[in-house]
Image (cartoon, rainbow, N blue to C red):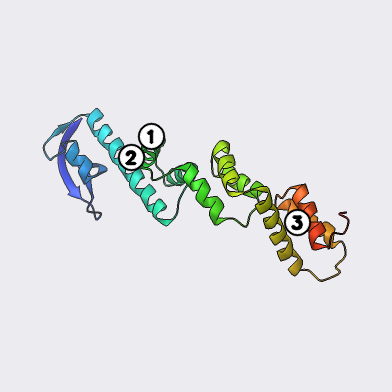
Amino acid sequence: MGIITKIEQQKNKNRVNIFIDGSFFCGLFTETAFLFGLKVGKVIDENKINEAIRESEQKRAFEKSLDYLSDRLHSKRELTNKLLKKGFDKNSIDGAINKLEEYGYINDSTFAKSYISQNSKYSKAQLKAKLISKGIDRGIIDYNLSEFFNEDSEFELCKQQAVKYLKSKKSGEKNLKQKLTASLARKGFSFDNIKKTIKELFLYDDFE
């Protein structure tokens, strides 16, 4: 393919630019260049330099992932989508994700448990929908929701949301029960819990 004529350090001291036959060819992590034995004057073949590029890109995707994870936990899908938007190819992303899972840096079950705990104001149905959108397996979602919720806790949450809603309304407002019912239904609470909540908050009036 050619001869390495120059290896130049980038502003990022962990990376270098590789020049082949006098022209810039690619950027690599310094560690990768060393591991592949790349040095000035070495005759390089296409397969070897491409393998070095793949290795370096996977490492770059891994380090970018760690930057994202330093801010907050991410699901596997969230992290994959962010890396895709940054222009990483699928092979680099898959390699980085596998390494992150191996090290325990990402775990969709741990993510689901943390997400549910931090968003406890939402109903079980809302949380399930949000976690599905983040790519979490339904089995993982159901297990973690069952660990966090029981019938009583879901009812208490429904009642809390109802009280919050009623505080923003005027006493005696027309069709208040129906409006509250619709609001709680949109939040994903079950009909049974809505019915119990309405009866309790309206002094056990008949549910309409």
The percent position of residue 146, horizontal first and vertical second, equals 60, 44
Of the residues shown, which amino acid type is indicated by label 3? Ser
* Residue highlighted by disc 3: 183
| Disc 2 + disc 1, Cβ < 8 Å | yes
Which circle, 1 or 3, is nearer the viewer? 3
* Residue highlighted by disc 1: 91
Distance of mark 3 from mark 2, alpha carbons? Answer: 47 Å
The mark nearer the N terminus, 1 or 3, is 1
Which numbered dot is residue 58? 2
Residue 20 is at least partly visible in this image: no
Q: Residue at x 37, y 53 (%)?
A: 67
Badge 1: residue crowd in 10 Å (few <14, some 14–19, many ≥20): few
Residue 48 is at least partly visible in this image: yes
* Label 3: element kind: helix
* Label 1: element kind: helix
Q: Residue at x 74, y 69 (%)?
A: 167
Quarter where residue 4 is shown: top left
Quarter where residue 21 is shown: top left
Of the residues shown, which amino acid type is indicated by label 1? Asn
The percent position of residue 44, horizontal first and vertical second, equals 18, 32
Which numbered dot is residue 140? none
Left or right: residue 106 versus residue 178 is left
Left or right: residue 39 versus residue 57 is left
